[in-house]
Image (cartoon, helix red, strand yellow):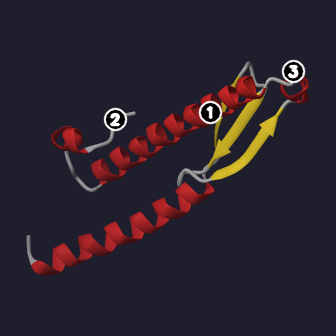
Amino acid sequence: MDLKAMLEMAEQMKAKLGASDQEAAAARITGEAGGGMVRVVLNGRYEAIAVNIDPKALAAGDRQFLEDLLRAAFNQASSRVLAEMQRKVSSFAESMGVDMAALGALLPKA
């Protein structure tokens, strides 16, 4: 591969990575617990966008129960963010001709 082709490929990668970062910021991924009593929405950067707590969860007055629901909802949302980002990275790598199977040990596990 000549230098010009490598520079063009690098520019393409830079553009795609920039778009991916914007997509991650715009993503909305939900986790829930307690049959939907607690919902947490994260973006693709693992930033909390929203936390919704059903009044029934508050009425119980059990702080530990509510904390457990919040933790479970955040963990579920976080796992879903990771899975979605892995899917996007894999798709991006394939579009650039990278064999993800060869990189499998380097990627975080869902």
What residue would you read off at disc 3?
A: 60
User: Which amino acid type corresponds to the residue marked 1 in the rendered image?
Assistant: Arg
Locate the N terminus and report the quarter of the image it occupies: bottom left
Which residue sits at x=40%, y=70%?
A: 15
Q: Residues within 10 Å of mark 2 (few under 14, many from 20)?
A: few
Which residue sits at x=49%, y=62%?
A: 21
The residue closer to the viewer here, 46 or 21, is 46
Asked where in the image residue 40 lies, by quadrant, the reply is: top right
Which residue sits at x=55%, y=34%?
A: 75
Asked where in the image residue 56 lies, by quadrant, the reply is: top right
Which one is earlier in the sequence, the residue at label 2 or at label 1?
1
Q: How many marks?
A: 3
Decide: marks 2, 3 in contact (CB < 8 A)?
Answer: no
* Callout in the foreground (2, 1): 1
Q: CA distance from mark 2 to mark 1?
A: 20 Å
Q: Residues within 10 Å of mark 1 (few under 14, many from 20)?
A: some
User: Which amino acid type corresponds to the residue marked 2 in the rendered image?
Assistant: Lys
Locate the C terminus and report the quarter of the image it occupies: top left
Q: Residues within 10 Å of mark 3 (few under 14, many from 20)?
A: few
Above or below, 53 against 16 in this view is above
Residue extending farthest to the left is 1
Q: CA distance from mark 3 to mark 1?
A: 17 Å
**Residue 45 horizontal/vertical position (percent):** 53, 55
Q: CA distance from mark 2 to mark 3?
A: 36 Å
User: Which amino acid type corresponds to the residue marked 3 in the rendered image?
Assistant: Ala
Q: Secondary structure at mark 1?
A: helix
**Residue 37 horizontal/vertical position (percent):** 79, 25
Decide: marks 3, 1 in contact (CB < 8 A)?
Answer: no
What residue would you read off at disc 2?
A: 109
Q: Which mark is residue 15?
A: none
